[in-house]
Amino acid sequence: MKPITFIRVLRTLLVLYLGMMFSASSYAYSYAAAGKEPVIDGREAILMALSNNDFAAAKVAADDLQEEFVYLLKEHRVDLQTPMALALENKDAAGVEAVMDCAVIEEIIRRLDGAGKNLGDYQVAKVLVVKSKLFLDLLMPKMDEGQRQQATTAIQGVLNAIGNPGVFGVGQAPADPEVFKQQRELLIETISTLK
């Protein structure tokens, strides 16, 4: 094989390999960001109903979240059903929204807990951290500038702490459970002020 042809073949293979790597990493990210999230969808439906002062529609949307509320009560000992029912009964829009903010906070905590338990599996941990960021973005408008900066720094710290598998070992970084724990606590402390 001529040297020039060999170089072309090698270059073509390199381009194909890099294309597959970028495609795989973008697929992993889109997988993490995609998918149904009942709490996000339910929150949106509830807030839309509240903006129209339609408490009947808000109740229907809240009823669709019963499975999530039962899970949070059973697994995290957080009762959102009782305050939601009370706020809807009293037509208390601010109360309904506050319950949904609590649901979002609990979903962030749930995802971060899952990531912490899966630090040995980079893809699973990354998906869970990215999911928690989707929920965090819903709370950002309710934070002051200092809280937003602290939350942004903490979620980035959590993401960095899960490590990186690198490409063929290049750029590989192991997960750091201690940093993960510190950044998780910082984030939870920041968002808990919204409860």
Image: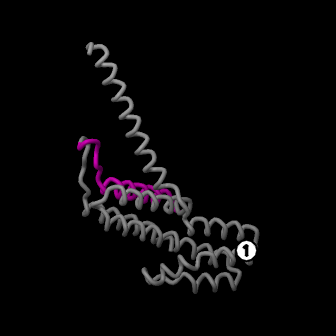
Q: Return the residue nearer the eye: 2 or 144.
A: 2
Residue position marked by numbered label 1 in the rendering: 57
Quick one: SS at disc 1?
helix
Number of residues whose C-alpha sits closer than 10 Å to that of mark 1, classed few (under 14), some (14–19) or many (20 or more): some
Residue 166 sits above or below residue 157 on the image: above
Magenta span includes 151: yes
* Residue 109 x, y percent position in the rendering: 42, 70
Residue 69 sits above or below residue 50 on the image: below
Quarter occupied by the N terminus: top left
* Residue located at (41% from left, 44% from top): 24
* Residue 182 x, y percent position in the rendering: 30, 64
Look at label 1 and name its amino acid. Answer: Ala
Q: Return the residue nearer the eye: 96 or 22.
A: 22
37 sits left or right of 122 in the view: right
In the picture, residue 62 is in which quadrant? bottom right
- Report the colour scheme: one colour
* Residue 59 x, y percent position in the rendering: 68, 78
Question: Magenta residues, as a range?
Answer: 143-169
Residue 116 sits above or below residue 156 on the image: below
In the picture, residue 177 is in which quadrant? bottom left
Magenta highlight: main SS: helix
* Residue located at (49% from left, 56% from top): 145
